Image (spheres, rainbow, N blue to C red):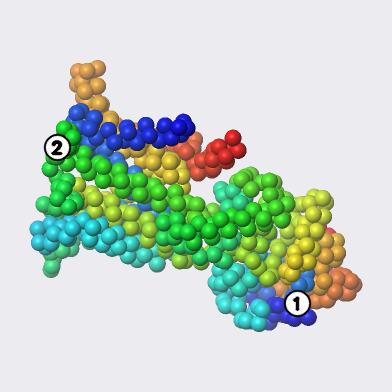
Amino acid sequence: MSRKTIGIVLVALALLALPLVLTQVGTAWVRIANLAILFIFLSLGLNIVVGMAGLLDFGYVAFYAVGAYTWALLASPHFNLHLPFWAILPIGALFACVAGALLGAPTLRLRGDYLAIVTLGFGEIVRIFMNNLSAPFNVTNGPKGITRIDGLAVGGLDFRATDRFLGIDFTGPAKYYYVLLLLLLFVIAVNLRLQNSRIGRAWVAIREDEIAAKAAGIDTRNVKLLAFAMGASFGGIAGGMFAAMQGFVSPESFVLHESIMILAMVVLGGMGNVWGVIAGALLLSFVPEFLRYTVEPAQKMLFGRLLVEPEVLRMLVFGAALVLTMRFRPAGLWPESWHKREMREGEAA
Amino acid sequence: MTVLLAADNISKRFGGVQALKDVSLTIRAQEIYGLIGPNGAGKTTFFNVLTGLYTRDSGTIEFAGRPLRLGSPHKVAQAGIARTFQNIRLFGNMTALENVMVGRHVRTHAGVFGAILRTRAQREEEAAIRRRAEELLVYVGIGQRAGDLARHLSYGDQRRLEIARALATDPQLLALDEPAAGMNATETAALRQLIEGLRADGLTVLLIEHDVKLVMGLCDRVAVLDYGEKIAEDVPETVQRDPRVIEAYLGGQVGDGAH
Ligand SMILES: Nc1ncnc2c1ncn2[C@@H]1O[C@H](COP(=O)(O)OP(=O)(O)OP(=O)(O)O)[C@@H](O)[C@H]1O
Ligand SMILES: [Mg+2]
């Protein structure tokens, strides 16, 4: 076995064992890991739009919301519908995809800052819709949100309950973990395959120089729409999983802050480079949680009382990380071009 | 000789500037056609109108016997016109090879699902795109640069790369906007050979160039623009002696090598 294969096997084993280990520490940590995976998934979806096609999207959370509400409405007592996951996830992806095309179509001529402003507005509009679509017909139940949403159930396997398997207890969150991991592998494969494909190259070409891309024969209109629609579909799938996992959705989960967070993950890690984006997403989802759980005890131990709220410190670290990245690594921690050079050196060696 | 491109009474105005005024010209198949004129004469504007990047105010363009639609550059590329830019426009963070592979876009078909599923057709097409791109890099003389990022190439190599990307679209007409600008004598000589080779391979070349020696040595016919108007169109020897052309150049700047 080559060193690479051994490495992959070790990483795979570690990832498989992780939820079992975390369960010992506390189920809350499994939930944190799940949300982290969900955010990696989201940032890889957004990577298609921002990283590859270079379309600055500040409203990505809208598609996440569409997916979440699709699941919530089709699998809860709210409308008394209880569709199976294999129907809801594709429908959610489709709705999000349509929303993506709706956002994309009128904004095709916009670039950079202007596009950022319009997408930001779009994200807010979707959230406000969710907030107000409770009268005259109660569609979204307004700010109260939708409760008692069905969890994921595959065949007879209920993802809410704990199952004993091979003498090991698998809690609900641990089981979600494995599903999310599977979905994550899928989105990584999609990203990697698109990256080295005709359409992926067209996206990057548009990002690099739209006029040259046009002159080289790319129908930039269609190709950009495709990026919006693809990115949005992944947002929709992530939203569905979120609703299933939490059992509750409300407009509060889909605020601008979330969009910015996902965008920051893409930018921090290195736009366009799958591994960079994953690193960025991991960093931005785990470090704050880590701080949240360690800062309080650490301060109590050192000073005997709480000096700085964990939430404050979290935002401080977050802000500092972004400022430092933009200052010293404007192309991200692990930029696409580096990755290319490493690949080439790897080939030559 | 068959006419490949016929531009008829093309006009284009930017605010107070009449960049093109009723410009008509015909380019025959397999000729090297020069487009010259003092700075700001409208040469680049003509390229932009021709390739659909600008909409024209009036006039028609017929290419290979069919009218060229307004304002859709990818349709122009599909019809068989490829171009390079005066101020080089490459995809800087893509490798040289990828830049050329982008040029194959218009002649290939694989979509998103083909790429995700890695269908057999997609894989074969992808391999063919790569092969063709590699060939073209070798053809323009930068085969050994395939893996370098475009922005890391030398100026002359970037110009060659732009030509390779244009060739990847399988054009009938290749429009070059000042390809020798910034090149030294050796590079210019190599460029000249390259263009002659292209013509020998059946391509038609439309060339904007300030290097008078290159234009006069290379072109079969030359058109001269001045303040948006065509003031001459003939074989180089005749154009060179045309009093209006001499006046246009001497009235403004000295033409040789000026930008
Ligand atoms: N996008 C534009 N907006 C406004 N004016 C323009 C634009 N493009 C060109 N012009 C003007 O049109 C005229 C012709 O410009 P053009 O670039 O076509 O000249 P050129 O013959 O290519 O000159 P050069 O030899 O310097 O490249 C100039 O006066 C220029 O300022
Ligand atoms: Mg010019």
- Residue placed under numbered mark 2 in the picture: A164
Q: At 10% from the left edge and 61% from the top edge, which residue is drawn? A: A80
Q: Name the residue under label 1.
A: B28
| C-alpha gap between disc 1 and disc 2 | 80 Å
Out of A84 and B17, give the one closest to the viewer.
A84
For badge 2, the amino acid type reads Arg
Q: Tell me: B116 left or right of A29.
A: right
For disc 2, the neighbor class at 10 Å (few under 14, some 14 to 19, many from 20) is: few
Q: Where is residue A207 in the image (x, y as percent from the top left)?
A: 50, 54
Residue B187: where, in percent of width, then height?
79, 51
Taking the spot 58% from the left edge, 58% from the top edge, the residue there is B128
Does residue A309 appear in this view?
Answer: no
Number of numbered discs present? 2
Whole-percent x, y for residue B74 in the image: 56, 68
- Which mark, residue B20? none
Instruction: Determine if the C-beta at disc 1 is less than 8 A from ligand 1.
Output: no
Work out which quarter of the rendered image holds the C terminus of chain B and state it: bottom right
Q: What residue type is labelled 1?
A: Arg
Task: Locate residue B256: give its quadrant.
Answer: bottom right
Q: Nearer the viewer, residue B225 or A270?
A: A270
What secondary structure is marked by label 2?
Answer: strand
